[in-house]
Image (cartoon, helix red, strand yellow):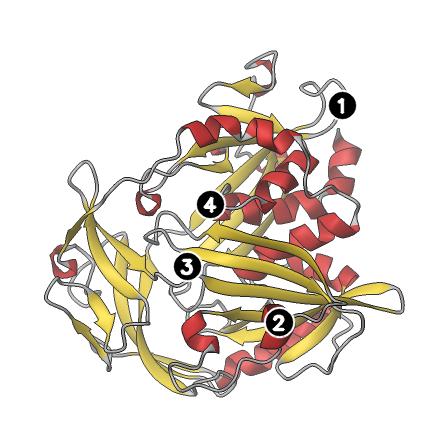
Amino acid sequence: MAASSLADLRAISARLGAEQQVAFASMPPNGWRFDDDGVLRHEQSDYFDIVGVVSRDGTRNILLRQPETALVGLVVTRVGGVRHALLTAKCEPGLHGGCQFSTTVQATPSNYLRRHGGAPTPHLDLVLNPLIRHVTLHDSIQFDWGQYYLGKTKRFVIIEIDSPVDAIAPAVWVPEPVLVELLTADFAVTTDLRAILPILLAHDQGVALDDASASRIDIDRARHLQVGALEHCDLREVSGWDAATNEASVMVRSIDVASPSREVGDWQQPLLDVAAPLASRLPIMPGGISPDGEVRYGIHARTALGLREVELWYPADEFANSSPEATVSSVRTSAEGARFLHHEVTLELTFAAEGASRATEVDAVPGLVQWVTLPELVALCVRDECTSVELRLALSLAIVSGAVLDARA
């Protein structure tokens, strides 16, 4: 099964999304319960939990806890000299539209080991057990959303096979020009695909994935690496744990799902309902900073509650110009649809704010911002546990906006 245009893919996702049925249910969902510590967990221990935690200032918060390292695998090959990627139309209850395109494999060990009694995960062996003649283009461990997860990680893998295999529906082979279009379309791809696809495109564009200067840039962040403890509290003591009785910035909702294209056809589960959309801006500085005139991107190191004081590289939002005329490109995407209810994330690539270029005569403002080239940004994003989800998602705009930046530099 192949899709040769963005319109083809939109038609597939619209059809599958329309087949999925989602309704609100009573709290807690069937099969879920509060344990003695006030953690909302499934009766099977290998599902994710929803927990209450207390931050340093005494504020009570809601976090997702999932000890498993999920697998995000992308299989690629060449057809007639053109790169193709094997994408899967993924139906998840919290996605805008109900269905978006994801990687070849997007699953937790519990899913692909079938601990929930679901169907086998298609194309799993291509990712976990590649043949000797196949090539691993990328393999890294990355943190998930630091403000929503308690230290959760994912493994991102790109496997190049020597010839296409039959696509098992709802998977499709997609040519690289259409992959680029997907990254510029609103609510077309999952955050997992948006985070890994730029690495493939950078590889194919000849951008070095192991730029040596990335190690130098990451020294400041590494100095601050530490793992702090979080105090737990009963989830039922946190405002918003029950959306039926509370209005808070993050609420927990129970949903009932019927999805014919999933490995399990129907289930109930909790989702996080985040009240405010997330906006993330990556500032760019064309010329003026780099002696060779390369475009530079502003990043800074910080942490989030669920990272337990581990600092990662984030977009340096405070240096971004938020005016519309300064925006080079923007796109809207959904946070993971199996954990969040229609949580909208807006990504923007913007020119830096007035005066940012005069902030320093060198590359770094200590403790504030690093101005990095595209190869440096790519190299940071492929390092293990180095960058935030926000920065890896923003890389997708940097990769596809090269021509625009060159014209405006």
User: Mark 1–mark 4 contact, CB under 8 Å?
Assistant: no
Q: Are marks 2 and 1 in contact (CB under 8 Å)?
A: no
Q: Determine the secondary structure under disc 2.
A: loop
Question: Which residue is pictured at 73% across the width and 70% down the height?
Answer: 174
**203 lies above or below 23:** above
Q: Nearer the viewer, residue 74 or 147?
A: 74
Residue picked out by circle 4: 279
Q: Residue at x 62, y 71 (%)?
A: 129
The front one of 12 and 377 is 377
Left or right position of 300 against 67: right
Q: Residue 129, which numbered label?
A: 2
Is residue 226 positioned above or below 27 on the image?
A: above
Look at the image and tell me in which quarter the N terminus lies.
bottom right
Write down the residue under mark 3: 343
Q: Amino acid at mark 4?
A: Ala
Instruction: State the CA–CA distance, disc 1 to disc 3.
Output: 38 Å
Q: Secondary structure at mark 4?
A: strand
Q: Position of residue 90 (x, y in %)?
A: 54, 74
- Within 10 Å of disc 2 (Cα), the crowding (few <14, some 14-19, many 20+) is few
Q: Element type at marker 1?
A: loop
92 displayed left or right of 197: left
The residue to which callout 1 is attached is 293
| Distance Cα–Cα, label 2 vs label 1 | 44 Å
At horizontal 13% and vertical 58% (from top left) the residue drawn is 234
The label nearer to you, 3 versus 2, is 2
Q: Earlier in the sequence, mark 2 or mark 1?
A: 2
Percent x, y of residue 223: 43, 27
The amino acid marked with disc number 3 is His
Rounded to the nearest angstrom, the CA distance separating label 3 from label 2 is 34 Å
In the picture, measured across the screen, residue 17 lies left or right of residue 294, that is left
